[in-house]
């Protein structure tokens, strides 16, 4: 039975992935920002181990008790705040850089001994914004461009330890975050116009289940 550490399991792609992994009998270790959210996750995903650590406070991650062996760490959590550079506040920048980039870096560092023990896989659920920055998306795209850099460096560093590192770049996906993006953009939201989260989950599972003789370094998924 494989063991996976997953962030962002409360909604969207992370929630869909957590459900699929539990359905097939894998063990899950999830993170929750507070005790109330942890209670909800335990109710929604029975059988999962839920650890309390707010990704907005990376120092709190040092207190996590992680398993001795992890087959994967999947970073699916994220926050977004759109706006022109002329209007984004320091707090807007700080939250997105911390949650979307610094927290994954810290959590990955803490999990590396367990990943090395299992010759596991790190998956960064990035974004199309990690490849190209559109107007209004500067802070979010900067965090995701940084996440790509983190993945590229980590992949080269951990190759000798047998740890595989993949970045998955979904385009607009029908999630609560996408609904919030549309609200910020002042646009009507139609979930049917965007990628089904299950499609992204299929791609992530393909990366996790890849035989040991190969790796997928980067995978881009776009709406039709």
Image (spheres, rainbow, N blue to C red):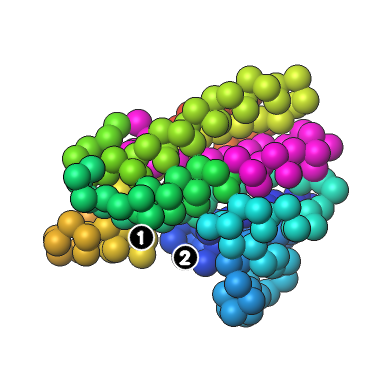
- Sequence-earlier tag: 1 or 2: 2
On the question of residue 44 being in view, the answer is: no
- Specify the farthest residue to the left: 187
Task: Please tell me which residue is depicted at 67% across the width and 37% down the height of the picture.
Answer: 121
Secondary structure at numbered mark 1 = helix
Range of residues picked out in magenta: 105-131
The residue beneath circle 1 is: 177
Task: Please tell me which residue is depicted at 22% across the width and 55% down the height of the picture.
Answer: 193
Pointers 1 and 2 in contact (C-beta within 8 Å): yes
Of residue 12 and residue 101, the one placed in the foreground of this image is 101
Q: Is residue 152 magenta?
A: no
Q: Is residue 125 magenta?
A: yes
Q: Is residue 109 left or right of residue 137?
A: right
Q: Which mark is residue 11?
A: 2
Residue 143 in which image quadrant = top left
Q: Is residue 73 left or right of residue 93?
A: right
| Residue 79 position in % (x across, y down) | 41, 55
Q: Residues within 10 Å of mark 2 (few under 14, many from 20)?
A: some
On the question of residue 32 being in view, the answer is: yes
| Residue 181 position in % (x across, y down) | 27, 58
**Does 81 appear above or below 157?**
below
Of residue 222 and residue 128, the one placed in the foreground of this image is 128
Of residue 82 and residue 195, the one placed in the foreground of this image is 82
């Amino acid at each position: 039975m494989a063991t996976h550490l997953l962030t962002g399991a409360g909604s969207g792609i992370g929630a869909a992935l957590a459900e699929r992994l539990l359905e097939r009998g894998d063990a899950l270790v999830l993170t929750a920002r507070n005790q109330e959210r942890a209670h909800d996750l335990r109710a929604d995903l029975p059988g999962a181990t839920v650890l309390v650590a707010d990704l907005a406070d990376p120092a709190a991650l040092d207190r996590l008790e992680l398993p001795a062996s992890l087959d994967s760490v999947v970073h699916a959590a994220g926050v977004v705040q759109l706006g022109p550079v002329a209007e984004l506040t320091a707090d807007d920048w700080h939250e997105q850089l911390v949650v979307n980039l610094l927290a994954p870096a810290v959590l990955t560092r803490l999990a590396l001994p367990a990943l090395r023990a299992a010759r596991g896989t790190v998956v960064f659920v990035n974004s199309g914004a990690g490849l190209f920055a559109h107007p209004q998306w500067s802070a979010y795209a900067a965090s995701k461009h940084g996440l790509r850099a983190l993945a590229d460096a980590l992949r080269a560093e951990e190759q000798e330890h047998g740890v595989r590192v993949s970045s998955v770049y979904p385009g607009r996906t029908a999630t609560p975050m996408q609904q919030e993006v549309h609200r910020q953009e002042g646009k009507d939201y139609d979930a049917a116009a965007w990628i089904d989260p299950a499609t992204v989950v299929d791609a992530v599972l393909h990366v996790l289940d890849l035989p040991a003789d190969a790796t997928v370094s980067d995978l881009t998924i776009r709406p039709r």
